[in-house]
């Protein structure tokens, strides 16, 4: 059972609208118009609205401009400019910008990588109740990055974010309960948190819930339920879920044995570098004809993950 859901490495265009909405109340007409322009993909119009406000010192506009630079949305991608605008907004107390500045330091995007600075900015955002920053602060404590490793502290921050419904934190809190790190081992609690994450569509939560059903940990053993949750995670591109779903098909557990289906899911997981899936793929090939292998390979090449 793995894995820890890690930091968001990139901000996608759809998230730009969501994050800008969260940045501040859209009382200013220019902000509202900028947000609307982003929602319809008109970044030039958004830039026209946000840049003057950002220059005037509006923190929400500064954060939005930083996001646009980080994405290259409406202007050339420029991580250094993104950091500059994130910093201006962060210094005014914008929790969104503080978290984004922390990510910039954590990943070395537009600034020299500095884990201690990342922690500082995550903390400023987290104490304001920003769930993503609480989750990121939990991650750095769990991994001892920029702070001494402290599983109890990690659990505390994960819980704050998880209680706000942040699915990545729910999954990671479930892992802490499953492993007994920073908290007493409790598979039933692990299942509860995995389920919360899984029900929100988190692919790692779906995978971990599948594991619990497969092995009967904290829940009654149920291969069909395991298959269902593995499939949900696999459909979204989780290599671990794809590998385990292949195993279920290969062994006829929770589904009729089907080497072509096993081969399909192992192909996908192997393409993501999952070594065990590669071994299984090579073994099951011996049970398929050349025509069958070719048909499955073509299907795998055409496959697109859901929700991407």
Image (cartoon, rainbow, N blue to C red):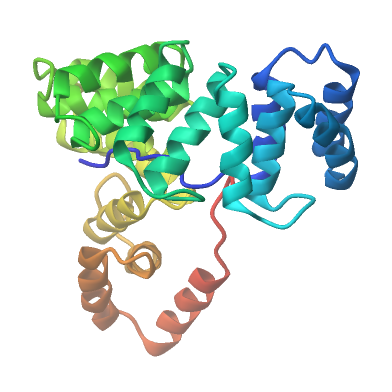
How many marks do you count on the picture?
0
Q: Quadrant of residue 188?
A: top left
**Residue 159 appears in view:** yes
Residue with the most extreme bottom position: 290
Q: Quadrant of residue 264?
A: bottom left
Does residue 112 lie above or below 94 as drawn?
Answer: below
Horizontal side of 55 relative to 121 (left or right) equals right
Q: Position of residue 118 (x, y in %)?
A: 37, 34
Q: Position of residue 58 (x, y in %)?
A: 74, 21
Looking at the image, which residue is at 62% across and 25% down? Answer: 89
Q: Position of residue 283 (x, y in %)?
A: 21, 76
Question: Which quadrant holds the N terminus?
Answer: top left
Looking at the image, which residue is at 55% across and 22% down? Answer: 91
Looking at the image, which residue is at 83% across and 45% down? Answer: 43
Looking at the image, which residue is at 56% across and 41% down? Answer: 83
Horizontal side of 115 relative to 111 (left or right) equals left
Could you say which is closer to the camera, residue 56 or residue 135? Answer: 56
Could you say which is closer to the camera, residue 19 or residue 116? Answer: 116
**Residue 201 appears in view:** no
Q: Position of residue 308 (x, y in %)?
A: 59, 49
Could you say which is closer to the camera, residue 106 or residue 235? Answer: 106
Q: Quadrant of residue 54?
A: top right
Horizontal side of 229 relative to 275 (left or right) equals right
């Amino acid at each position: 059972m793995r894995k820890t859901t890690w930091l968001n490495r990139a901000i996608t265009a759809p998230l730009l609208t969501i994050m800008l909405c969260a940045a501040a109340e859209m009382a200013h007409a220019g902000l509202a118009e900028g947000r609307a322009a982003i929602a319809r993909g008109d970044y030039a119009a958004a830039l026209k609205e946000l840049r003057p406000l950002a220059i005037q010192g509006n923190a929400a506009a500064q954060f939005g401009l930083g996001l646009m630079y980080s994405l290259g949305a409406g202007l050339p991608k420029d991580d250094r400019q993104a950091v500059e605008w994130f910093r201006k907004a962060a210094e005014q107390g914008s929790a969104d910008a503080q978290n984004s500045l922390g990510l910039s330091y954590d990943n070395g995007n537009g600034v020299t990588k500095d884990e201690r600075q990342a922690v500082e900015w995550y903390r400023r955002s987290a104490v304001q109740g920003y769930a993503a920053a609480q989750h990121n602060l939990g991650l750095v404590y769990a991994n001892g990055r920029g702070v001494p490793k402290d599983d109890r502290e990690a659990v505390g921050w994960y819980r704050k974010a998880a209680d706000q419904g942040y699915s990545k934190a729910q999954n990671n809190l479930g892992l802490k309960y499953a492993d007994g790190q920073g908290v007493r081992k409790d598979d039933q609690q692990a299942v509860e948190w995995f389920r919360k994450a899984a029900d929100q569509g988190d692919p790692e939560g779906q995978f971990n819930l599948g594991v619990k059903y497969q092995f009967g940990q904290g829940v009654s053993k149920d291969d069909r339920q395991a298959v269902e949750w593995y499939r949900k995670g696999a459909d979204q591109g989780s290599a671990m879920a794809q590998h385990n779903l292949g195993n279920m098909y290969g062994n006829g557990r929770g589904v009729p044995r089907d080497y072509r289906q096993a081969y399909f899911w192992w192909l996908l997981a192997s393409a993501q570098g999952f070594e065990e899936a590669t071994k299984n793929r090579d073994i099951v090939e011996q049970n398929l004809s050349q025509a069958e292998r070719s048909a499955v390979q073509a299907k795998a090449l055409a496959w697109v993950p859901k929700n991407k």
